[in-house]
Amino acid sequence: MRLDVPHDVPQRRTPEAAPPLEPSPVERHREHLAARADDRPGPQVPHVKHEQPASHERSRESRERRVAHDRPMDQRTRRNEIPQQAVGLSLRDEERKVLAEVGRFRVVTTRDLAETVYDNRRSRMERDLAFLREKGLVQVDSVNARRDGRGGRVERIEVVTLTRAGRDVARQTSGLPQDQKLYAGMVKPREVEHDAQIYRAYSKEAEQIERKGGKNLRVQLDFELKSQIQKAIYAERKADPQQDMAEIKQQVAEKFELPFVDGRIQIPDARIEYDQPRKDDRDSEPDQDQGSRSGHEDIEVLTAAYRPGHLRNKAQAGFHVYASSSDRATLTSRIENDHHLMENILEL
């Protein structure tokens, strides 16, 4: 007698014939283990307690890491913030000078470094920069020069910036005053050429200051000055909310020895502060109690993007104004009726 039952058996083995709601063997095995665990008397509880402290331990370690990050800089381990290849690094004088100069101005061209630090020995500079790059202390980039509506081939400028590790090393090795702020990284690539020219203007101005006996030069860039001025304005408004804003700005401008023109505090691209020894009479002994007096010079770098009104305000501010030869030519053509504004602009 022939039966058709065997035809159903292979059909049950195939996945297509399996009932859609029937659990798979793996699922049945998991359900079986779960049922056995539910039938066990209490030994599962210690196992749960054993896993909980591990979670707490991870949380505690995470909190400790956050606390360590929030500690003041002088309480952290400096070695952890400097690349391993830079720990215990011995730097040459020129290399320390590069870190210091780039750190003070945030960005400097290789052309200016070759001139001011290496006495135009470019091959030596390139070897030192390659070494500092290998140690993770500097970054060398090539950026486009400003166009300002000019045609022709796009010029490229090679500039140097510090890494964060380079800034830390510069702080330890530069010998700069503690109140000298140092910077790392590039902030505004479109303004790199202008910002790099500030260092060139500083070099010319510093030469004049040192020739007159100025020492211990410090630099404040415009955004550092702006930050201090904003804090001072906020403090004055908080002390007397009824005081007129124009009056507050006038007082703050006088406090920072900055000009107040057309209702605005004029802020230079950079301020150079220095110590100037006091002049004593030749027939008298130097007054040791007098110490030294401080002075400052404010410098501004003009570009072809300056509008006549902006240029006029900078000229009235009394800053030491610099501009490249190409920028001077463009500015002169824009202010045909105010040629006297260009008389005191120094060439970079």
Image: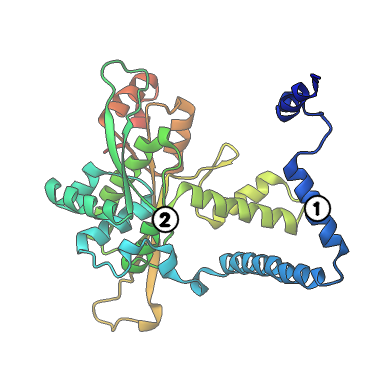
Q: Do the CB atoms of the residues marked 2 and 1 lie less than 8 Å apart?
A: no
**Display coloring:** rainbow
Give percent across and percent down for residue 276: 33, 66
Residue placed most toward the observer, 255 or 41: 41
Which of labels 2 and 1 is toward the front?
1
Residue at (33, 55) in percent of width and height: 137
Residue at (36, 25) in percent of width and height: 331
Q: Is residue 174 above or below residue 259?
A: below
Disc 1, SS? helix
Q: CA distance from mark 2 to mark 1?
A: 58 Å
> Which residue sits furthest front?
1
Picture disc at residue 206? none
Residue 300: image quadrant is top left
Give percent across and percent down for residue 281: 28, 76
Left or right of 260: which side holds 149? left
Quarter the N terminus occupies: top right
Mark 2 is on which residue type?
A: Arg
Residue placed most toward the observer, 2 or 156: 2
Sequence order check, earlier mark of 2 and 1: 1
Asked whether the viewer can see residue 111, the reply is yes
Q: Label 2, on which residue?
A: 164
Q: Is residue 298 above or below residue 305?
A: below
Give percent across and percent down for residue 236: 68, 56
Mark 1 is on which residue type?
A: His
Disc 2, SS? helix
Q: Is residue 320 above or below residue 91?
A: above
Q: Residues within 10 Å of mark 1 (few under 14, many from 20)?
A: few
Give percent across and percent down for residue 255: 56, 57
Q: Label 1, on which residue?
A: 32
Residue 153: image quadrant is top left
